[in-house]
Amino acid sequence: MSAFDDDMIPDLAAERVFYAAGALLTEDDFRTEQRYHRGRLGRVLAYLHGAGTIAGLDVRVEPEEGADAEIRVSPGIAVDRLGRLIELPYEACLGVARWYEQQIETELARDRLSAAFREGSSGAPDHIVVDVFARFTACEREPQPAFADTGADNLNGIQPSRILDAVRLSLVLRHRDDDLAAIGPRPEGPETVDADGIRRFKREQLWQALQLEQQDPPRLPLGPEHVPILHDGSEVLLGRVRIPSLREPDELPRFDPNQPARFDEDVRLYAYAVRELALLHDLDR
């Protein structure tokens, strides 16, 4: 399911419900009311604060080596490029060995795994690289009876009574020919950090940076970290993991539990609060 299935996305117009005594309110009125408030908040967060980690969401590999090594993401919160909050309320983990085994279940996955086997500092292939992403997702909760659409064959007489704003974590396998130095989120910010550069950026570039592309479904311009088939441009990159691997002649790469996995979080972006920026400039005393 695409993140753009969220019903606040297709209509970004600032349209809100007008209430009048005796007026009939329908399902569409209540949806419009929610879209208005969610959409206005999202626009402010996206354009004023930008996308990135707000707090938490620390990614680590524990233990660093061994068959029971896990990629763990701590609780935290981020904002995506549409201004939606991505909140993980609990620690999430994924067994490295288990994930590796899943990559050989289909022919396509096996081909990708072979193409991702990379050379290490010794000059011999010894690892693969995966990027950890978080994205906003909406989960239907608490089904209850509802009026079905007209037609005897329709089966939508049960509808969710709640929608949970949740987060989905995923791993993206990077091809060995990919330039990792170039595959990282590009901040929507000025090239020169001075008053003139910031003003020029706000006048000439910022508006277009987060405009949806007119297609079905609508989509943000993809960043260098995104994969066109897998991503819609709203995913937030949390970090990069180098997983030690072995490969015998004529065999697929396999997880090497005897070598440590390495994690790099320098590729992630952060969304800074005003007070944090003040501290950086020694203004908050």
Image (spheres, rainbow, N blue to C red):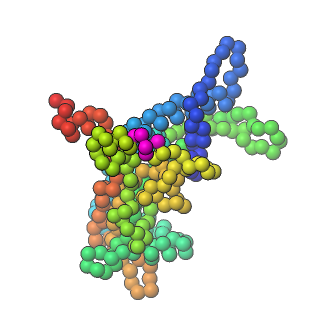
Residue that appears at 72% across and 41% down: 156
| Residue 237 x, y percent position in the rendering | 40, 53
Of 25 and 147, nearer the camera is 25
Q: What residue is at 26 percent from the left and 38 percent from the top?
A: 277
| Residue drawn at the location 36% of the way across and 46% of the way down | 189
- Quadrant of the rendering where the C terminus is positioned: top left
Q: Position of residue 248 (x, y in %)?
A: 39, 84
Q: Position of residue 262 (x, y in %)?
A: 29, 64
Judge whether residue 86 can be spotted in this image: no
The magenta region covers: 202-207
Q: Residue furthest bottom?
A: 249
- In the figure, residue 130 lies in which quadrant? bottom left
- Residue 42 located within the stretch drawn in magenta: no
Residue 83 is at least partly visible in this image: yes
Q: Position of residue 160 (x, y in %)?
A: 62, 38
106 on left or right of 202 = right
Q: In the drawing, does residue 184 fall left or right of residue 26?
A: left
Q: So how many labels did they put on this image? A: 0
**Magenta span includes 203:** yes
Is the magenta region chiefly helix, strand or loop? helix
Q: Nearer the viewer, residue 80 or 50?
A: 50
Q: Quadrant of residue 199?
A: top left
* Vertical arrangement, residue 187 with respect to residue 164, above or below: below
Residue under the image location 39 percent in, 61 percent down:
183
